[in-house]
Image (cartoon, rainbow, N blue to C red):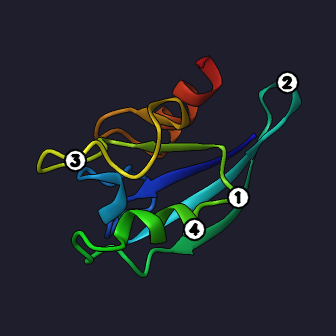
Amino acid sequence: MRVAIALAKNDEGKVYPGPFGHAPRFAIYEVGEGGRIDLLEVRENPYAAMEGGRKHELMRELLKDVDLRVGARFGHGGSMGAFPMADRLEVGPVSVAEALEKVRAR
């Protein structure tokens, strides 16, 4: 399973505290057999500052190779966000290590 974790602006060890789609970058992990987790890449989010319009469509395209999106929270301003509830995990403003533990426990 491939996982994207929203990374904080100035600390890649923390989950971005705002809405998932506003994170400046995402850590992409592969979760394998026995709970093994490997970092594959850190992907920039060129749509972080974008509001409305095609943002949801563009975010889905950016993360189309990811099975689970992990963030502090999803959606804002009455929006439920770009991704179905089943494809995301809301963890709050925690460390990336804590977020990965929640992924393992899922």
Which residue is tagged 3? 79
With respect to residue 5, does 44 lie above or below?
below
**Amino acid type shown at disc 2:** Gly
Task: Return the mark for residue 61.
Answer: 4
Occupied quadrant, residue 36:
top right
**Amino acid type shown at disc 1:** Asp
Label 4 to label 1: alpha-carbon separation = 8 Å
Query: Can residue 7 be seen here?
Result: yes
Verify CB contact (< 8 Å) between mark 2 and mark 4.
no
Rendered residue at 23%/53% (across/down) = 18
Q: Residues within 10 Å of mark 3 (few under 14, many from 20)?
A: few
With respect to residue 46, does 43 lie above or below?
above
Label 3 to label 1: alpha-carbon separation = 23 Å
Which residue is tagged 1? 65
Q: Position of residue 98 (x, y in %)?
A: 47, 33
**Amino acid type shown at disc 3:** Ser
Q: Position of residue 79 (x, y in %)?
A: 22, 47
Q: Residue furthest top?
A: 105
Pick whichever of labels 3 and 2 is earlier in the sequence.
Answer: 2
- In this rendering, which labeled residue sits more in front, label 3 or label 2? 3
Q: Position of residue 59 (x, y in %)?
A: 46, 65
Tell me the SS state at disc 2: helix
Label 2 to label 4: alpha-carbon separation = 29 Å
Q: Residue furthest right?
A: 33
Q: Residues within 10 Å of mark 2 (few under 14, many from 20)?
A: few
Assign the C terminus to one quadrant of the image: top right
Q: Position of residue 73 (x, y in %)?
A: 29, 41
Residue 47 placement, left or right of 30: left
Rendered residue at 51%/51% (across/down) = 5
Label 2 to label 1: alpha-carbon separation = 22 Å
- In this rendering, which labeled residue sits more in front, label 4 or label 1? 4
Verify CB contact (< 8 Å) between mark 3 and mark 1.
no
